[in-house]
């Protein structure tokens, strides 16, 4: 009978490179009916992330926001009711959608953003007084370093 051909070992697959992702940051300034309560309200934070995600047309999972009261100096015991909240945000997403997301966020008007906040938050009156979008940065994950060689065992 004919000799059986030797089994050719399957080629070892090359490690899949981690996908590149991109990030951009921005800032919104909001005029809010109760800035202190807004900043401390988890629902307000979630709504802010949702508004940014909607306007950039990305998943809310890609958006991270930090809220802070602008001019948070309390005079006496009176709470300032009307005031400003600064929203610092970062959107981190796959590089393939980043340019479009950033330009959508850069083009959205303060009125559109204000309307979106109004639709999500009924407990506050929110007006967007300024919006700023930073530049896009591509982040390429570093390759995983090879494990160090094992130390020789002493004889």
Image (cartoon, rainbow, N blue to C red):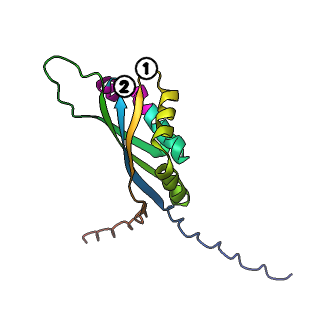
Query: Where does residue 140 sit, x and y in percent of width and height?
Result: 43, 64
Residue 5 visible:
yes
Magenta stretch holds residue 44: yes
Asked if residue 15 lies left or right of residue 2, the reply is left
Q: Please tell me which residue is depicted at 45% across the width and 38% down the height of the picture.
A: 49
- The residue tagged with tag 1: helix, strand or loop? loop
Instruction: Identify which residue, 17 or 42, lies in the foreground.
Output: 42
The quarter holding residue 129 reads: top left
Mark 2 sits on what residue?
41
- The quarter in which the N terminus is drawn is bottom right
Residue 93 visible:
no
Mark 1 sits on what residue?
123
Query: Where does residue 134 sit, x and y in percent of width and height?
Result: 38, 55
Rate crowding at label 2 as few (under 14), some (14 to 19) or many (20 or more) other CA atoms within 10 Å: few
Q: Residue furthest left?
A: 76
Above or below, 36 against 89 in this view is above
Above or below, 58 against 84 in this view is below
Closer to the N terminus: mark 1 or mark 2? 2
Q: Which mark is residue 115?
A: none
Q: Please tell me which residue is depicted at 43% across the width and 55% down the height of the picture.
A: 23
Magenta stretch holds residue 32: no
């Amino acid at each position: 009978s004919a000799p059986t051909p030797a089994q050719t070992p399957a080629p070892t697959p090359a490690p899949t490179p981690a996908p590149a992702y991109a990030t951009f940051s921005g800032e919104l300034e909001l005029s809010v009916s109760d800035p202190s309560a807004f900043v401390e309200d988890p629902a307000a934070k979630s709504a802010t992330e949702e508004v940014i995600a909607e306007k950039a047309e990305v998943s809310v999972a890609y958006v991270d926001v930090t809220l802070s009261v602008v001019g948070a100096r309390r005079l006496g015991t009176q709470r300032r009711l009307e005031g400003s909240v600064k929203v610092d945000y970062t959107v981190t997403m796959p590089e393939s959608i980043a340019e479009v997301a950033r330009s959508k966020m850069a083009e959205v008007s303060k009125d559109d953003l204000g309307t979106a906040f109004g639709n999500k938050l009924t407990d506050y009156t929110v007006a967007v007084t300024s919006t700023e979008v930073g530049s896009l940065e591509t982040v390429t994950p570093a390759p995983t370093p090879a494990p160090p060689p094992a130390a020789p065992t002493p004889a």
